[in-house]
Amino acid sequence: MKTHVRVLVIGGGVVGVSTLYHLTKKGWADVALIERTELTAGSTWHAAGLLPLFNMNYTVGQLHKYSVDLYKRLPAETGQDVSFHVTGNLRLATCRERMDEYQKYCGTANTIGVPFEVIGPARVKELWPLIELGGSADTPAIIGALYHPHDGHIAPADLTMALRKGARNAGAEIYEHTEALAFERVASGEWRVRTGKGDIRAEHLVLATGNYARQTGRLLGLNVPAIPVEHQYIVYDESAELKAYRQGGGRELAVMREPDKSYYLREERMGWILGPYERGAPARFADGVPDWFGRSLFPGDLDRLVPHVEAATRRVPALEHCGIKDIVNGPIPYAPDGSPLIGPAWGLRNVWINEGHSFGITAAGGAGWQLAEWIVEGEPGIDMLGVDPRRFGAYTSKRYLVQKNEETYRNVFTLHFPDEERPDARPAKTSPVYDRLDASGAVWGQRYGWERANWFAPPGVERRDRWSFRRSNYFEHVGNEARLTRERVAVIDLTPFTKHEVTGPKAEAWLDGLVANKVPSKTGRLALCHALTRRGGIRSEFTITKIDAGHYYVVSAGAAERYDSDYLFKSLPADGLVTLRNITNTRGCFVLAGPRSREVLAQLTDTPLDNASFPWLTAQVIEAGLAVDVYALRVNFVGALGWELHFPIEYAHHLFDALFAAGKAHGIGMVGMRAMESLRLEKSYRMWGSDMTPDYTPFEASLDRFVRMNKGYFIGREALEKQLAAGVPNRFVTLEVHGVTDADPLGNEPLFEPGGRMIGRATSGYYGHCLRKSLAIGYARAEYAQPGTQLTIEILGERKQATVLRESPYDPDNLDLRT
Ligand SMILES: Cc1cc2nc3c(=O)[nH]c(=O)nc-3n(C[C@H](O)[C@H](O)[C@H](O)COP(=O)(O)OP(=O)(O)OC[C@H]3O[C@@H](n4cnc5c(N)ncnc54)[C@H](O)[C@@H]3O)c2cc1C
C-alpha cells in the first residue's frame, strides 16, 4: 500500500470510484481509494440502475447529462460492459399541473441541451403497448407524457468496475478492506489518514462514504447534512404478457414513471422492477451505520408498498399475473433538498465532499467529473451552486435532517411547483419579529433554515398559498405590497442577510484583492462588490461599507452564509493583520423603503437625512429611537428611496414598533419576498445564485461599472482581460414578455432569435406589478442584447414575443433613489 498520495478517496461506491477515475482523466495518477469492505458494498450494489435525465435543478441536470454520455462511452474505453439499456424514459401525466411541470422542465432541458419529447396519449400507447390509458377515478386518464429517448438503465456494479478499470489503467490504486479510522492534519498541511492497514498521507481527501457520510464527517469535526432513508423496490417473476410482447418483436419498454402515483416500473429479465417513493419511509442511521449492517438490507415493508402496487397493476394489468420474487429495501443517502453535496468542505483545507447522493448511479459520472476539475484546477467548470455542500449551514441538526430527508423522499414524485414551500422541520430559525409579522398575516416561506414572509394576507384573506406554475391566489396581494413600496413606505425584514465584520490595518487591501470593484476608502462610503472565480465568473456579491478606519461591514445573501464565510475565512492572510468575524446572528436588518421613508426615519433619529447630509450610496452609524449603533445604509434591493437599517439584534422589537408607530400616518406596511422579487426585476437588479453565478463574468452580467480593471490585482482579473480581448460572448438582458395571460417567466426559460435559434436563457422572471409588465432577466448572445431587439421566450411550452428593454425599466435614471 502506498503511504503517500496526492488525493485519497474514502469510499468505494460508484461515486468514489468515479471521482478516482476522473482525477486520472485530469492527469493526476498519484491517487488512491480506500474501501472499508469491498467496492460497491454500500448502496451501489442494490441500486435499481435507473438513469433519469429528468431533473429540475440546473446543475444536477448537467451532471446527469454528462453521466449518461460517459456511460455510453465507457465500455469501448475500458473493455468492461456496463449493461446500459438505452430504453428511454417515459413520465406520465394525468393532470394539467403535471404537464406544466414537464413544460417548465423543458425550459431547463433546452438550456442545457438534453433532448426530450412531449407526447400525447396515442404515442404513449405506441411506445408502451402494455399500458392502460385509463379514464376512471382510480386510474386517471393519461393526458400526455415526457419522453427522454436517450437514457435507460445500467448495471451499477458493472459501471463501478468499468470506472475502476479506467482509473487503474491510468495508474490509480484501490485498496479494499481498508477503513479510514481517523484523520489528522500534519505540519506540512497534508492529511494523515489512519487506516486498519497503516497510515496514508494525502494532499487532498475526498469523502465519498455514502450512508457513512455523517460518521466520516464527524471524524473531521464536520456535520455533513446527509442521512439515508429506506428505499424499496419489488422484483417480479417473469410476465407472460411481457414475454409474448418481446418474443413478438417488441423492443424493451422504456422505464415508465407514473409520478401522480409515485412509482416507477422497468423491465428485468422478462419480469419487472417496481419502485415506489412511499409515504412513511423512515430515515436510518442518524447516529451512524451500526457494525452489523454491512452489505445487508432491511426487511421489506409491504404495507408501504401496497398502494403503489395497486396503482401500477391498474395501469399495467400484466403485473397482476406476476409473482413477487424479491423485495429490496436498502438505505439511500439523502440531503435535505434531495440534491447531492459536491464540493469543498467548509472550514477545512483540501477536504472535498461527494456525499448525499440519492440518484448516485445517475449522478456519479458528473459528480466525479466536476469534483476532479475542482480539485485539480481549483474551480469547477460549471456552476455548481446547486450542489455545493455549503448551501446548508450549521442549522442542519440531526432532527432537522431526519424530518427534511423523510419529507424530501416522500415528495420525489409529487409536483414541484416553483412557489412550493415544504412544511416539515419548521419554523426553525426565526427573526426576533417573527411573531409580529405572523400577527400581520405573514404567509411563510423558508430559505437556509430561516422563516421569511413571502407575502401578507390582508384580514379576511386565506393565509395560504395555492402553489402553481401560473399566477395564483396571492398575485393581487403581492401587487398591493409592491405598489405600497413605490407609493408610500414599506418595511421588509431582511434579518437573514449574511454579515461579516472585517477589521485591522490590512482590511481594505485584503478586501480589495478579493473583489472586482474598488473597496471604499472613505468612511461612510459603500460599494457593491463582486468576488470572482479565477475564470472570471461571479462567485459572490458583497455590499461593503466602510464603518471606520480599518473597519468594514460586509453584507451578502442570506443563503450564502456558509458559502461566503468559508471563502472569506480561507482567503485570510496568514500575517494576522486582518480579523474577520461572522456577525450574521448579532445584527438584524429592516429595509425601510418608499417615498415616505425619509419622513418616517426622521422621527426616530436626529441624524439629518437630506440628500446633502446623507446621500444615496452612503452609510452612517446612527441612533434610531432608543437603539444605538444602527448602521444605516442608503441602498436597497427594491429601487426606492430608503435605508437598510442594520441594528444590534436586541433592538429588533423596539425598532420595529418604533418604525410602525412613526409610519402609521404615512400608511406604512409590511412587504414580503414576492413583492421584493417583482420590484427588483423592475429595476433589473441581479440576484446572487440565479442571475449572478460562476457561469457568467461581470461583463456578461453587464456589471461593467462595478469592475475596476485599472485598480491593480484582484482574483479573476486575468480572465476578464482575456475575455475583453476576445470579445464578451453574452450580455445581460431585461425583457418585456408580451401576450402573457397567466404564466409569467420564472427563470430557466430558453430565449430564441426570430429565426428560432436558441441564443440565451432567462435566469429570473416575474410580473412587474407597478409597470404592469411581465418581465424576465437573463443572458443573450451579445448581438441580441441591444434594447429594442425582438426575441421569443418559451414559457410552459408556449413561445412568447419578448422585447429587450433598456436596463431598469422602472426609473432608469434612479431618480427615486436620489430624491
Ligand atoms: C433500493 C435502492 C434503489 C436505488 N436505485 C437507484 C437508481 O435506480 N438510480 C440511481 O441513480 N440511484 C439509485 N439508488 C441510489 C444509489 O444506490 C446511491 O445513490 C449510490 O449507490 C450512492 O453511491 P455512493 O458511492 O455515494 O455510496 P455507497 O455505494 O454507499 O458507497 C460508499 C462506500 O464507502 C465505504 N466507506 C464508508 N466509510 C468508509 C471509511 N471510513 N473508510 C473506507 N470506506 C468507507 C462504504 O463501505 C461504501 O462502500 C438506489 C438506492 C437504493 C437503496
Image (tube, grey):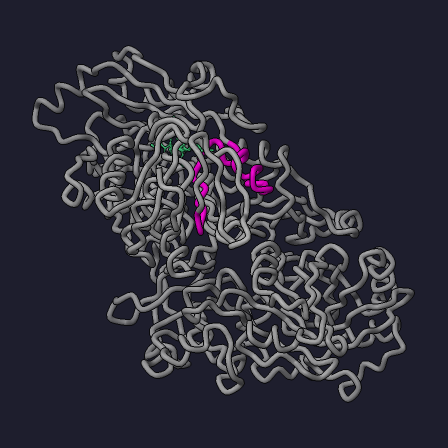
Q: Residue at x 50, y 36 (%)?
A: 213
Q: Residue at x 20, y 31 (%)?
A: 253
| Magenta stretch holds residue 81 | no
Q: Position of residue 586 (x, y in %)?
A: 77, 57
Foreground residue among 537 and 212: 212
Query: Going by the image, does 114 lie left or right of 649?
Result: left
Is residue 214 placed above or below 325 in the rendered structure? below
Q: Residue at x 73, y 84 (%)?
A: 615
Foreground residue among 286 and 262: 286
| Part of the protein shown in magenta | 202-227
Image quarter where the N terminus lies is: top left
Q: Position of residue 299 (x, y in %)?
A: 44, 14
Foreground residue among 242 and 222: 222
Q: Quadrant of residue 215?
A: top right
Q: Position of residue 260 (x, y in %)?
A: 41, 32
Is residue 527 placed above or below 454 in the rendered structure? below
| Magenta stretch holds residue 208 | yes
Q: Quadrant of residue 268?
A: top left
- In the rendered image, is residue 594 in sight? no
Query: Going by the image, does 21 lie left or right of 622?
Result: left
Image quarter where the C terminus lies is: bottom right
- In the rendered image, is residue 539 in sight? yes
Is residue 321 placed above or below 500 in the rendered structure? above
Residue at the far right: name it: 626
Q: Residue at x 25, y 14 (%)?
A: 237
User: If the picture is divided into quarters, which one holds ligand 1?
Assistant: top left
Q: Position of residue 747 (x, y in %)?
A: 45, 59
What is the count of numbered marks?
0
